[in-house]
Image: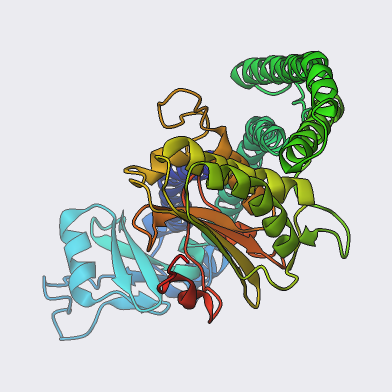
Amino acid sequence: MRWALVKVSLAVTAMVVVAFAVPLGLVIREMARDRAFSNAEREAAAVAPALSITTDRDQLERVVASAGSDDGMSVHIPASGEPADGTDGTGQRAADIGRQRATDEDIAAVREMGRASTTEVDGGSTLLQPVALSSGEIAVVEVYVPESEVTNGVGTAWAVLAAVGAALVVGSVAVADRLGVRMVRPAQRLVEGAHQLGEGRLGSRVPVEGPTELRLAAVAFNSMADQVVQLLANERELAADLSHRLRTPLTVLRLNAASLGDGPAAEQTRSAVEQLEREVDTIIRTARDAKPQTAAAGPGAGCDAAEVVRERMGFWSALAEDEGRKWRVAGADRPVRIPVARADLAASLDALLGNVFRHTAEGTAFAVDLHNGEDAVIVLVSDAGAGIPDPEAAMARGRGSGSDGSTGLGLDIVRRMAESTGGDVRIGSSVLGGTEVRIWVQLDGRAAPERRGHRGTVRRRRQPRQAATINRSRSLP
């Protein structure tokens, strides 16, 4: 907008300057020409009284010398009885005083017409003024007007006009630029405030300044930001309150689990209750503090993905045996460090494995593969179910599969965990015939800007050289 105003002002001012300066320059040139010939007419008029009294050469030379100069003025006096061709009866030329520049034809034409005339000569122009002598004959006074006198002051006047025009253009551009800044700066601050608010800096506000429209926009933006802050605060309080209400039934579950005695099932139940209590505490703290609890921070932080995979598969294997499901774990026999908090990876695996048990029939096989590449770690959770017909819709937060008990938040938990490291999540077809969810965990975290797109959209990046081996045949035991 700023440059648009400058360009418009520059164009309009330039047109105005051209429309007025060019005609004015032409008028000044004509005025200078008229001034030069007016001076020449005055010089010629100064000689006319002397010509009407005498034609003596000596006296006329003194008059010419006093009126002008011998080089700039000349007088052409016809001889007595001069015929029309400009010679006397004996073939002699008429008497001339001074230097002649005009041609004989021009001088003869002025005598015949009886009025002044101008003609172009080398280096300028001449004024030919007819003067009647006492004998009734016509003498011609020739006054030379050099070109420098005709254009005297014209160049200076044009330079002044050009300077004034340039000053007007520069001044209009400067004024337009200041007006543009006054309009653009509030808009830029509004854009910066929107970006800051989108990046999570909820305290960002926009100064109310500038034109009326931008002031109203700033007021509306600040009001919207206040409402967003209030809504988020209410949401955090609601999440904390709802999570806190779960403590009572969790306490009952813990007491009942303590009375189950010994055995693998009782230990798994007590472990699940303890994990659920930890998750509820994490939710309450996160909601109260309004801080995201995703990627682990600091050098060396994270967890051993292989250990977490073995632990969660040990938990889900009991349910798999009850439902007659075949299962397999690959690549979890050695440590694999990833920059993800242990609780986050465990929650992601539980979400994916829970989907397998929830959305596939009993007896459906599943597998978990862990691959450690040069710059990324890939976790594959695949099953032999019916598959997902619309993977993009499944990645949409809160949409779910449409079945009872499906909220659609499980895949979103997985996606946020992967994207916190610069990775992503893809849904495709597995070699088992069902769904394969591929979690890409970036180890250095520097590829996030180039790989992450819109929610559920994945931009493919170079995979480790060994990644292709994952998609080869993986037979279940």
- Residue at horizontal 39 percent and vertical 45 percent from the top: 391
Q: Colour scheme in the image? A: rainbow
Position of residue 203 measured from the top left corner of the image (x, y, whole percent): 81, 27
Q: Please tell me whether residue 241 is drawn above or below residue 374 in the rendered image.
A: above
Position of residue 308 measured from the top left corner of the image (x, y, whole percent): 73, 56
- Residue 18 as seen in the image, left or right of residue 200: left
| Residue 208 shows in this picture | yes
- Residue 85 as seen in the image, left or right of residue 286: left
Position of residue 10 measured from the top left corner of the image (x, y, whole percent): 51, 45
What quarter of the picture does the N terminus occupy?
top right
- Residue at horizontal 31 percent and vertical 64 percent from the top: 140
Foreground of the two, 437 or 196: 437
Foreground of the two, 456 or 253: 253
Residue 273: quarter of image: top right
Position of residue 28 measured from the top left corner of the image (x, y, whole percent): 47, 49
The total number of labels drawn is 0
Residue 279: quarter of image: top right
Foreground of the two, 31 or 417: 417
**Of all residues shown, which one is farthest toward the front?**
262
Residue 262: quarter of image: top right
| Residue 45 shows in this picture | no
- Residue at horizontal 47 percent and vertical 72 percent from the top: 72
- Residue at horizontal 43 percent and vertical 74 percent from the top: 57
Q: Please tell me whether residue 362 is drawn above or below residue 442 in the rendered image.
A: above
Q: Please tell me whether residue 378 is drawn above or below residue 53 in the rendered image.
A: below
Q: Please tell me whether residue 13 is drawn above or below residue 217 in the rendered image.
A: below
